[in-house]
Image (tube, rainbow, N blue to C red):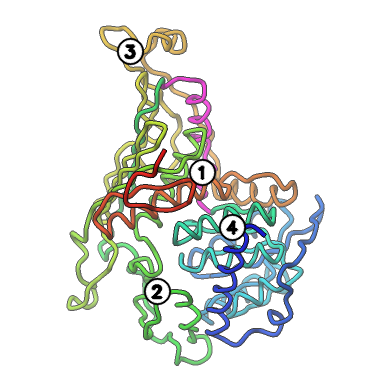
Amino acid sequence: MSDQNLNRRNFLAGAGAVASALSAAAPSFAKMSAKSAARVIGANDRINVGAIGVGGRGTYVANEFAKADKAGANCQVVAVCDVYQKRVTRNKEHFTKLYEKCDGYLDYREIVGRPDVDAVIVATPDHWHAKIALEAMDHGKDVYLEKPMCHTVDEARQLVNTVKETKRVLQVGSQTTSGDQWHQARRVISEGYLGKMLMSQGSYHRNSSNGEWNWTIDPNAGPTAKGDDYIDWKMWVGPAKSRPWDPDRFFRFRKYWDYSGGIATDLFYHVVAPMNICWGEAQFPYKVMAAGGIYEFKNLPEDPSKPDREVPDTFHLIGEYSKGHSIVLSSSMANSQHIPGLIRGHGASLIMVEHGRFEGFAPHITLKAERRQDKYIVPELEAKFKGESEIKIPIKEMDTMQTHVNNFLSCMRTRQKPTLDVETGARAQVLITMAVQSYREGRILYFDEEKWKVVPKPPRG
């Protein structure tokens, strides 16, 4: 067995030990083998889906699978899981009405251990993403893994290795990557319309009166509550640092480093993943630096005496790539004005989203040639631009969420690589995870691609 496989086994064993220490093992889980064979899904077989983590996002994604089924994708949600009983009850009842039967669990291992479940949706807080996905793949499940795909660089490596070893289909749930503009951009870049690629830029801005991620807290819910108000807090904390019950951490987890990277992992993933598709070859960053701060949302709106968040409300990063180009991203949760999403080349620029909203529809992408005194900076581009300074390429409007879900379901049947496959997803993840680390440590960081390690100095070679 290779060192990589051994490391993965140790990683899974550790994840299992955490879960076992937190709650009594469910009967079906206790009987699971270390590795299970997946059911071969024929073209006409119905795909059984289990949803793990059915808060707001998980419920939405599960319903998108049900929507795809209605449109002919032939799948059904057969089980749901969450550590909050109210969410389990609500979703169990909802999907039972749709499919006659849907089981509900507090322990995700009940779903992972079911031989009739073909795929799982993982929409838990970020710090559980990799552990559940790895366990699911080791038991023969394909995985629709909400962004960010994981919480650490090493988890990204484990996911890449496990997809290769188990040959499972893993789609990272950043549905914007199914938009037509990124694939059209990839085509024109590959055809040489930019000349030498220099820099990509983008942003993700919001402005909420209460501060981003200050979602509603249910005052009756908690680990000592009964019935639908019960929350298995210890299971939810899982591999993170043990802490006493804190409803702000549970309901607003994206504000805390233990469970999230804030802006970088929640929002920049929707920018970095499409950029990697545009470039034509997903790439690891070579050098990463980040800055920002908590400039506006310093105190909880309902209690000004308490700190509002650990993660910054304003954040920006620069990533450099060994092939000689950079990415520059900006964001604030206290200002909603975006900057255009574009890629600059020596010979031309490509504007993918002029309005700057990477999850929004753009009716066209625009190529703008670099010219001086009516002469092209890169003479070879004159023929491509046919003497014009600007080319607009129309973009097909689509439901990107449904396109993304259907792509995953189709790949489950064909065993092809999905739109946002694990390797592309990992390269986006490394950039944003390194940016979080750079911000927290206040220093420039480098990535040793060969060793999959974040290092303080440029790697050799």
Q: Looking at this view, name the residue that lies furthest to the front.
A: 460
Residue 183 is a magenta residue: yes
In this view, the mark in front (2 or 4): 4
In this view, the mark in front (2 or 3): 3
Spatial distance from mark 4 to mark 3, Cα to Cα?
A: 48 Å
The image quarter containing residue 31 is bottom right
Residue assigned mark 2: 251
- The residue type indicated by label 1 comes to Thr
Residue 235 is a magenta residue: no
Compare marks 2 and 4 and give the one earlier in the sequence: 4
The answer to whether the residues at label 1 and label 2 have Cβ atoms under 8 Å apart is: no
Label 3: how many residues lie within 10 Å, few (<14), some (14-19) or many (20+)? some
The location of residue 148, given as percent across then percent down, is 47, 57
The location of residue 370, given as percent across then percent down, is 32, 17
Compare marks 2 and 3 and give the one earlier in the sequence: 2
The answer to whether the residues at label 3 and label 1 have Cβ atoms under 8 Å apart is: no
Vertically, is 223 above or below 287? Answer: below
Q: Residue at x 47, y 74 (%)?
A: 239
Compare marks 1 and 2 and give the one earlier in the sequence: 1
Q: Residue at x 51, y 43 (%)?
A: 177
Spatial distance from mark 4 to mark 1, Cα to Cα?
A: 29 Å
Which span is picked out in magenta? 173-194
Residue assigned mark 4: 4
Label 2: how many residues lie within 10 Å, few (<14), some (14-19) or many (20+)? some
Residue 377: mark: 3
